[in-house]
Amino acid sequence: MPGSPQTVSALRSLLAARFPERPRRPGGGPAAAVRSIDDALGGGLPPGRLTELVSAVPSGGGQTVIARLLGAAQDARQRVALIDGADGFAPGEVPGDALRHLVWVRCRAPGEAFSAADILVRDGNYAAVVLDLRGCAERVLRRTPASTWYRLQRAAEGGCVAVLVQTTSPLVPAVPWRLVLETPFSLADAGALREAVADRLGVRTERSHPPATEALAG
Amino acid sequence: MRYAVLAVPDFALHALRRSEPGLCGRPVALVAGEGRRARLTEVSREARGVAPGLAVTLAMSRCPGIVLRPRDPGAEVEAHRLLLAAAFTLAPRVESTGPGCCTVDLRGADPARSEALMGLRAAELAGAGLPLRAGAGETPLLASYAARCADPVLIVRDPGSFLAPLPLLFADPTPGQEEILRGWGIATLGALTALAKAEVGRRMGPEGVLLWERAAGESERVLRLAEPARSFAAQWAYEPPVESIEPLFFKLRRFAERVALELRGAGFVAEKLSLTLLLEDETDHRREFRLPEPGADVEGWMRVLNSHLETVRTAARVAGVRLVAAPARPQERQEGLFDAGLRDPASFWENLARVAAIVGDDRVGTPVPIDTHRPDAFTMERPAEAVAPPAEAQVHPARGPVLRRFRPPWPVRVVCDAGRPARLEAGRLEGRVCAALGPWRGAGDWWKPGAWAAETWQVEMEGGGVYQVTCTADGWSVEGMLD
């Protein structure tokens, strides 16, 4: 039975009021919820692409980015996988609610992290996969064959997942986006609200490559 | 089982037969060489009285009506892509080992499911004209031996008893080695591995040791991984061009079988099919079909294509055909109006099981902090099926940078000045402390075993970096970096 336009309009208004939805970004990728990073990437992590975030200094803010990303993904009701190459994530640092949509993989070696990433990037259920390689032995990471990275890039291109690779020095060959965190935190930041702390993060864009419009079928 | 090998015996012959409808059920042989030197290389089962290596003239006299053909590289490429697509449905780490042979890294996959899938793929490929043999074992070599003996699937659970009766030729000995071993009365892999490896090495040198290892199925190697298909398309050029619809149907079905498997291996289904007929007069006929229900069902695709092709009239003969499938993620479940659940639950749980097999069951999941003040206390739980809506804003919002833990904590010697850390001395972190916040003192569980007490400081190092250091009964340690 067709409803009257007034009824439909009233229902729409009621739904919009009770379930407000955040505006979608044009790119459709998950937001990092860190102003400088989102600005550099044009609104959020690019889906179907690798983004390398280099923590060039100690206390550069890489972990704060992960915490903010988890919060933003929770708001957007998206699922996130964190592949933790050196098992450094501290669940107690993030509100419990912001962990329910997280799949955390605690690796012992970079090889485990790459294998897990190869599987999860292809999964299709995640909006973002974070591959955190900070804390892994640099000489082991340097020995990673370029084909491993290309394979990961090809896997990401096949789907709509945004892949954020965290490193301490530039590592990913031919990565479309490479951002460098260069502003270290100090103890003065310890009492500030986390949102303000995240806004303080300084990012230098070392490489940027706006995603080309291409069909999935190639 | 850690590896699987999918292999098609007489691959070139089967590739040719599946590309030509007229060769089905007839005696066929592949020929290599010119003139009098031409010899049969592969022979179909229907060709009675002939065998590979036979001269062509002799074969024609022994088996009247035998169809002799050279190899068809185009058909072999198409058949190998079908085999590769089947392999990618088992696991994402696949090696294209050779023509008609793929090796799959099954580590992390559920063994029972992998075995069932191998059986299923063997049946599907047999229907598509490729009699697949699948073997699985602890090493790629063992899996390849199993594939050679399989009918159609063989899982090697006890390598010793499987290898023992196999002929020595399986280990690929050189003619010299074969002669020596025949002189010793050794004809099977079991007989060779019954000898001590060191003794074999002493008498036959390093090559003998390698032979012994191959005989024991122990040879490990790194797989050269192949990339899964990224475009789901197939194309064929007819030589000569065709006038009737039957060759088109035949070729489109072969394409559909391969493309559907490639889509399934990548976790996709097709939402649209695009058909192009390339005509002899250099024009083309194109048509796009939006499928009533996105899927990777060959019969469903063929119904759509057939019903269109039966009505098509072209101005010239068809010189080629192209089929392209537009991929989409399968809608595995009905989503609620405000639900944000899994898009593909089967793939989600299967992939988590694969990751758990790599890192350990207790190291994958959703972390849940335990209600205690003990540092770093959490449990790992099974991830939720649906992402819950955001909770209301916290009364006490999070402050400061986030701690990145060092597990295990780094032991450190702390020099204090007026009760405050002034300098850290340790192998991994040394230097003067330029600012320190603290102490935060905590203790708990003092009424039961496992009591803890800690004094925590946050220190900023002169050379940069803010760290969290803790003093417990065991001494000072760096718990992590505020990052």
Image (tube, coloured by chain):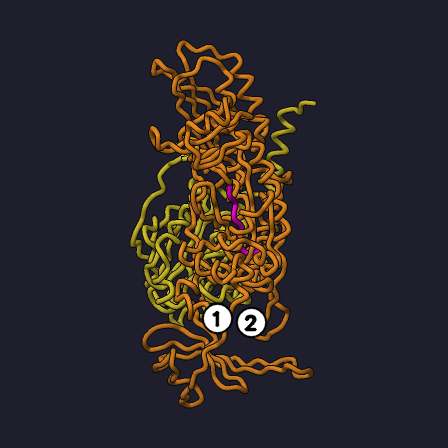
Chain colours: A yellow, B orange
Residue A76 seen in this snapshot: no
Looking at the picture, how far across and down is residue A203, in whole percent?
34, 57
- Chain ID, mark 1: B
Report helix, strand or loop for mark 2: loop
Q: Quadrant of the C terminus of chain A?
A: top left
Is residue B225 one of those drawn in magenta? no
Residue B278 seen in this snapshot: yes
Disc 2 residue crowd, few under 14, some 14–19, many 20+, Cα 10 Å: some
Nearer-the-camera pick, A123 or B175? B175
Pointer 1 residue: B405
In percent of the image, x 58 and y 49: which residue is there? B348
User: Which mark is on residue B376?
Assistant: 2
In percent of the image, x 57 and y 38: which residue is there? B330
In percent of the image, x 34 and y 16: which residue is there? B282
Residue B71 found in image quarter: top left
The magenta stretch is B1-8
Nearer-the-camera pick, A13 or B316? B316
Q: What residue type is labelled 1?
A: Arg
- Chain ID, mark 2: B
Query: Mark 1 or 2 closer to N-term?
Result: 2
Looking at the picture, how far across and down is residue B254, in whole percent?
51, 28
Q: Which residue lies furthest to the left in this view?
A: A206
- Horizontal arrangement in the rendering, residue A166 relative to residue B218 (left or right): left
